[in-house]
Amino acid sequence: MAAHLARRLLAEFTGTALLVTAVVGSGIMATRLSPDDVGLQLLQNSTATVFALAVLILVFGPVSGAHFNPVVTAADWWLHRGRPGAPTLADVGAYTVAQAAGAVGGSLLAGAMFEVPLGMSGTVRDAPNLWLGESVATAGLILLVFALARSGRAAVAAPAVGAYIGAAYWFTSSTSFANPAVTLGRAFTDTFAGIAPASVPAFVAAQLVGALVGTGLVLALYPAAADRAAAATASTTRPLQRRPV
Amino acid sequence: MAAHLARRLLAEFTGTALLVTAVVGSGIMATRLSPDDVGLQLLQNSTATVFALAVLILVFGPVSGAHFNPVVTAADWWLHRGRPGAPTLADVGAYTVAQAAGAVGGSLLAGAMFEVPLGMSGTVRDAPNLWLGESVATAGLILLVFALARSGRAAVAAPAVGAYIGAAYWFTSSTSFANPAVTLGRAFTDTFAGIAPASVPAFVAAQLVGALVGTGLVLALYPAAADRAAAATASTTRPLQRRPV
Amino acid sequence: MAAHLARRLLAEFTGTALLVTAVVGSGIMATRLSPDDVGLQLLQNSTATVFALAVLILVFGPVSGAHFNPVVTAADWWLHRGRPGAPTLADVGAYTVAQAAGAVGGSLLAGAMFEVPLGMSGTVRDAPNLWLGESVATAGLILLVFALARSGRAAVAAPAVGAYIGAAYWFTSSTSFANPAVTLGRAFTDTFAGIAPASVPAFVAAQLVGALVGTGLVLALYPAAADRAAAATASTTRPLQRRPV
Amino acid sequence: MAAHLARRLLAEFTGTALLVTAVVGSGIMATRLSPDDVGLQLLQNSTATVFALAVLILVFGPVSGAHFNPVVTAADWWLHRGRPGAPTLADVGAYTVAQAAGAVGGSLLAGAMFEVPLGMSGTVRDAPNLWLGESVATAGLILLVFALARSGRAAVAAPAVGAYIGAAYWFTSSTSFANPAVTLGRAFTDTFAGIAPASVPAFVAAQLVGALVGTGLVLALYPAAADRAAAATASTTRPLQRRPV
């Protein structure tokens, strides 16, 4: 079982790293190739993120659940605590560490690929309307993930979560970070997708508020969790868990 | 059963709100970031709407059917009246109120996220060729939704409806509002996606005409409604309705 | 059975009309909103076409097969002649007339929505390299459609054909008309997507050559047609044909 | 069985050719139509590639597996050597020749469609950070392909691989060639997508390094290959192999 947890943590670390690499790397490419139109840059950045996120959930989902996000892991623990297959509180801690480390590593990998000097971001993102954006973005993400999980439709989570972020980049004022680990990682690059370290705590706080709102909506709209065994049968994203490993 | 209706109305309210938030919010982001090219703004706006609409149908479909649109609810009542599972006329009224309230709320939420002053839209959209566009857009939407429902393919409604609107933004002269509730909500913002209040009634009338045309096409092309039980089995968007709640 | 054929012809007429409306209409919108960059116009035009084509195949597929294209109907007759469910030569004629009439009607509808004066296209598209583009585009389309049909995967035809055209708009020199009926319809509009009437015959001839090449590739790669009953079971695009109507 | 191999090689040749035609052709179209913004060109190029790659995998997957890439074929041999259905070392050699020949042919076909004079690329792509990009891109591709294959989800490979390349165009510094055969083919065109012949060997070496890393990740995350028979049942991409041909 320890080996199994190690494999899940490897998945969370690698998946979160590649997610941040995709977000930061495509942001750098966009600003270099389309210097004259910020909106076109964001379109390139969001398109690449949609594709990357969907693919990463497909790749890592069967191993670790492909959370890549501490508030998703925490909400999974809270909503399903005590049920078979749900993460324990220790899992939440271990996942969070792996996600945070991966996010920082992914940011550095993007910098290495594009020969960007090391350095923290100087992009201040500090305003109440941005925090409102983060809360809305995170509430929607939590609602989506667990609406699918609790109705036996986790098999479509990959394109659905990708699409959600692709929309939320545009309809929230903050461009939808919606992820404490990714927010931390994006502090480690002074490029398009960066966020000044001093702006991180308030963003994370707003995300936590959003996660609470989203969890409340899940309980209001999907009060009964789908039977996990039935959901697993319907799901194609966790097939390995149905075989002895 | 009252609790169940309340849950469905919460879904219609929240889903329609977030749909309008996505349409209005991404329109504001687009005009701010790409001020020099209206076509690029519309591409950003339509891309975000495609993703948002698909995701919202996934999230709310199993609870309320994810209509978000009074003419869809009304057509569902008319086409399937008297059959088990179809909305009653009272449902049509309740859904319409929830959708309209949600649309206005979503418009205001977008404004709050982007710090836009409160105010009604000043964008006049008044011309016979725009009304023709709305009729075409709404007819196509009704045809799509019920072609899928009546042939047991509601499971693909989420990406299909998203894609339809993504096309209709571009191929109709009116950019395809196609929804009386959303039209009302878009009157409550003086930004890219807004519509002057005085232009709303004619838009809604054109949508009603389109809904009639679309319903006629449904009856001509899919005269026999698929057996609802069989359709429900084939569908992944209403799984909760197959379990006692 | 006559009523059934009438319904199929209504589907081919309406579907081809809306396809041309989408191609022509989105082209007009694109040139009006992004006058400074032809590449951006084509991106808007191709994106709208991808979405529209996928949706139209979903809507009309269960009724008529959603060919919208005389060379697809003809190839279906040739490849599957004499087998149950395949079109007869009379069907090919009737489908072609419905498709051609629909294409012209769709072009006129787009013009009406955008208040474009009636008139034939003045865009000459006459060069051997464009004809090569049409042959390549049509060969690929035929190969795709029948590779899916002959391997029991018609259920994914809607997004697949949409995606194919979205690519072929860009990788062929002619922007991939690939359809004699649509080519004819596009002669009836003097806008972005138009083609001068004098250029139509050579385009159609190149499409026929491509259809022959594509059919040859189908026979080389998929020599055995999938059992139609098995394919129908696997397919979600023709569900109504499994019930008495 | 020889005839069967011939058909598989025809599929690999034709599929790789059309892939390179799509990459090179859409690059030429993009630079001609959007001369003022390189980022917009890359967005057009990557969008066309996403669609083309997904479609080509659908078309050729059931025949040959739709590798189009020597490192995919080699990794398939290494990971599954000795198991029924896996390629032999002789298959790896034959596939590689077919892929390389197809890639060159596809490059020439694109040039013919766009009337580009014959000639090798003059675009030097020589820098350690680009090689790092190629290694990352190829590792991710191998991980994706075999994560899906080893968990019985090959049916979603077509859109997933398309999406992956659509992201990697943007988040890797090298725009993600990730394929020795395609890299060779892209040396045969002096256009947007070209690469100088002298830059090819180092790109291929970096891709081989990435393939090793990706294979290691596959073994770490998916140590047990899914039972191939079970995977075949779950897969819709190889249906013909379940019938006598």
Image (tube, coloured by chain):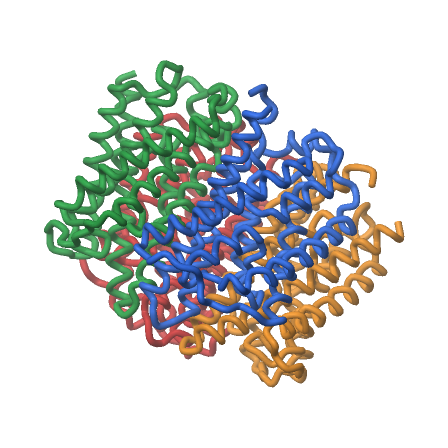
Chain colours: A green, B blue, C orange, D red
Q: Nearer the viewer, residue A149 or C98?
A: A149
The answer to whether one can see residue A27 in this image is yes
Query: Is D150 placed above or below A170 here?
Result: above
Q: Nearer the viewer, residue C196 or D1?
A: C196
Name the residue rendered at 80%, 53% in the picture: C7
Q: Is C76 left, or right, of C245 in this rendering?
A: left
Q: Nearer the viewer, residue C144 or A51?
A: A51
The answer to whether one can see residue D95 in this image is no
Q: Position of residue A202 (x, y in %)?
A: 19, 41
Q: Position of residue A231 (x, y in %)?
A: 50, 24
The answer to which quarter of the image holds residue A74 is top left
Task: Say how many tags the image has.
Answer: 0
Query: In the image as oriented, which residue stretches furthest toward the right?
Result: C2
Q: Position of residue D160 (x, y in %)?
A: 44, 45
Name the residue rendered at 73%, 39% in the picture: B80
The answer to which quarter of the image holds residue A210 is top left
Name the residue rendered at 63%, 49% in the picture: B71
Query: Is D118 placed above or below D226 here?
Result: below
Q: Nearer the viewer, residue D132 or D196?
A: D132
Q: Is A33 left, or right, of D112 in this rendering?
A: left
Q: Position of residue A197 (x, y in %)?
A: 13, 45
Looking at the rendering, in which quadrant would you find the C terminus of chain C? top right
